[in-house]
Amino acid sequence: MPTIPLQARLGRRPPLPLAIAVARSWQGTLARWAALAALMGFAVPAKADEASQSPASVSASYTAEDLTVAEGGIRRGSAFRGLAEACLQVDLSRLGAGAGSKLSMSVLDPSGDDVSADYAGDLQGASNITTYNHILLYELSLSGSFADGRVKVKAGRLLADCDFAVTDSSSALLNSSFGWPTFISANTLNTGPAFDRSALGLYAQIEFSRGYALRVGVYDGDTFDSTSGDPSRHPDGLNFKLSRSQGAFAIAELDVTRPSAPGSDPTGVLKIGVWAHSASFRDQCTTGKCHRGNGGVYAAGELPLWSKAVPGGPAVQSLTAFGRAGASPSDRDRVSLAVEAGLCAKGLVRGRGDDLLSLGAGFAGISSYAREAAKLSGAAALASHELAVEANYEASIGGHLMVVPDVQWIRHPGAVSGRRDVLLYGLRTQVSF
């Protein structure tokens, strides 16, 4: 009989093993990143007063989290996860290139366990930093701007989740449903061009007038270059294969920003988008039947509900609502409808102007075709949906450290009927420099 780990029996990770896990993660990360620091060292000015003269800049961060499934899911237990990231940006305009031109590169080094696969068994992903553990190229792009900044273009290894279908007010939440949307990630080849795999692509943004902008992107259709979805085939992110069989992913979005007073924050944002994929997709119910192409529509938005200036300083207390919904064909997609909504409050505690209190709910609706296929195959029955509800508090300390206690409740994890609802809690920290 296999031995059940102590943390699985207790429903949490004991303090000493957690400290050891953090130390081991840091040890391995620092060893691998020493060489990277040496290669990027040319971008760091030798003296502080030279910073403004250097065309290049380097930034780095390390995120560590420990998430515990206290009840439900596959089993109880804790998962520690770490993610190191280094970014290099070079202002090419200061080297004689066109105005607004820039070179961007970033590298990831993930480590640790997968709380969803090992414990929660959920569909949408309880942690938005979970990925295959291997150092990899994250982004490599050239960008430029024209017409006084109203036209912007990018080319290279790009990430669509940086530019499309996202809301700023939901960014503090840890569940993946609030990032790159489930109505795309669950229905394209290997989640599409988003964390943690970029894709060869082209991106353009045009601002027509104050408050209106159009974004368009075209990307390689398979970021893993693996029809089986095996992330270990090209784990370093250095494969640049293009083929007709893996198709192309395209997305377009119209952003409408409600007018506001000059110099103040926008008073509302509405995003309307459409996406398409040109590869073949299997029918969810009929064996051997395929559909040519896939696609969907979505809308997302943010609306400030309340704001108040704090006496004696520039800080502002505010409350913002966010929401997003997307739909796609039921016959070829497992998740035919996904909806997210929530609230984000900033600066509610006196003297803590940058802190965020966030609450959100993410709904993933399982298509009728997928549920019927599960019934006919004799596999475990599928529930009609998965629902994740999350609340957390993001505390910013000294400008370089963030601490985020988090709690989640997941209804029908994995959309598997009979699987107990998940109660999950944990702590995330991030240091940046």
Image (cartoon, rainbow, N blue to C red):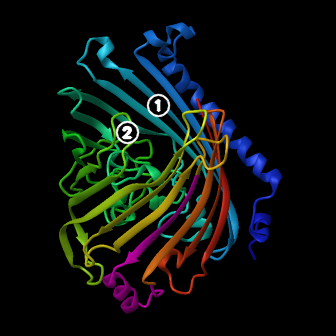
Q: Give the range drawn in magenta.
A: 357-382
Dot 1 falls on a residue whose secondary structure is: strand
Name the image quarter holding residue 148.
top left
Q: Residue 366 carries which label?
A: none
Please tell me whether mark 2 sits on a helix, a strand or a loop.
loop
Measured from the top left, where is residue 227 in percent x and y?
A: 32, 60
Label 2: few (<14), some (14–19) or many (≥20) C-alpha neighbours in 10 Å: few
Locate residue 330, reporting x and y percent.
27, 78
Among the two numbered marks 1 and 2 on one chain, the one whose residue lies closer to the N terminus? 1
Residue matched to label 1: 87
Q: Is residue 335 above or below residue 239?
A: below
Quadrant placement of the C terminus: top right
Residue in the image at 65% along x and 42% along y: 352
Q: In which quarter of the image is residue 24?
A: top right
Q: Residue at x 30, y 61 (%)?
A: 299
Residue under circle 2? 238
